[in-house]
Image: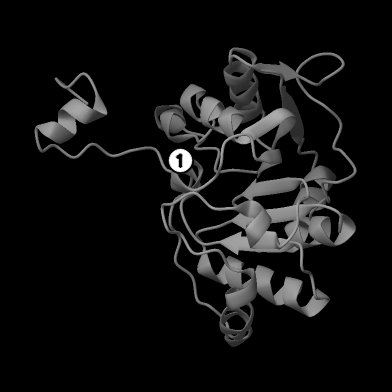
Amino acid sequence: MGQYKSQEEAEAAGVYVSKVKSFVKREGRTTKAQARALEEFWPTMGIEYTGEPVDLKQVFGRDAPVVLEIGFGMGKSLVEMAANAPDMNFIGIEVHRPGVGACLSEAGEQGLTNLRVMEHDAVEVFNNMLPDSSLSRIQLYFPDPWHKKRHHKRRIVQPEFAQTVRSKLAIGGHFHMATDWENYAEHMAEVMNSAAGYKNTADEGNYVPRPDYRPITKFETRGQKLGHGVWDLIYERIS
């Protein structure tokens, strides 16, 4: 930010300062099936970004615990979680359009009514649309690790974001992260252990066994066969 002490000061001087986003936009080809799913299921399962607070009870037509996943990829595990927990509501946020289409296709085929998706930057959704204390769990699975040290500042798990997440969780709600990069797992633990208002749910150390509700992906299975580790971290909002 150079000589400017804050984002507001820079903007007042007419200087644009780039902000950390929850993603890197990766354009890909949308298949015909994904395009059909977007057309058919978005009207009932999609949430448009408006920048205004959303009424989650109205969105789902019922009052139930809400789980939100940041960056669901192609959506297979998110759909599986929603199918396995019909008494809960699920929201997935993803910027990759083919992934949104694939998720809608799978969910539509299964006739799910407890899943909604958004195609937008998660940070902006959190800041502008999600009511405070409205979520029972926030999931961040295998985010971009930005493994080069000079890129670590681009990782989504930072002190400011930890407090943004905390504000959207209900008391007793969980922030569940998973990564297959040990260095990023250590970074996540360092940030979250210092974050006010949270406690680590691990019995010992920083990491927990993969909970039953998080499906194991083909990618994860393949990595385990090659000797790669996966680290799960779950932090509870306590204040």
Q: Nearer the viewer, residue 140 or 223?
A: 140
Q: Secondary structure at mark 1?
A: helix
Q: Nearer the viewer, residue 82 or 88?
A: 88
Q: Where is residue 41, by image quadrant?
A: bottom right
From the top left corner, tell me how far across and down residue 5 is, in percent.
Answer: 21, 18
| Image: 75 above or below 236 | below
From the top left corner, tell me how far across and down residue 212 is, in percent.
Answer: 90, 43
Q: Nearer the viewer, residue 133 or 142?
A: 133
From the top left corner, tell me how far across and down residue 135 is, in percent.
Answer: 68, 40
Q: Residue at 86% across / 46% down in the picture?
A: 213
Q: Residue at 83% across / 50% down in the picture?
A: 216
Q: Residue at 74% across / 73% down in the picture?
A: 106
Callout 1 crowding tier (Cα within 10 Å): few <14, some 14–19, many ≥20: some
| Image: 131 above or below 192 | below
Q: Mark 1 highlights which residue?
A: 127
Residue that lies at the very extreme toward the left in this rendered image: 13
Q: In the rendered view of the protein, which quadrant contains the C terminus?
A: top right
From the top left corner, tell me how far across and down residue 121 is, in percent.
Answer: 46, 51
| Image: 137 above or below 216 | above
Residue 72 seen in render: no
**Left or right of residue 160, residue 227 in this image:** right
**Left or right of residue 232, residue 52 in this image:** left
Q: Where is residue 234, by image quadrant?
A: top right
The amino acid marked with disc number 1 is Asn
Q: Residue at 76% across / 32% down in the picture?
A: 232
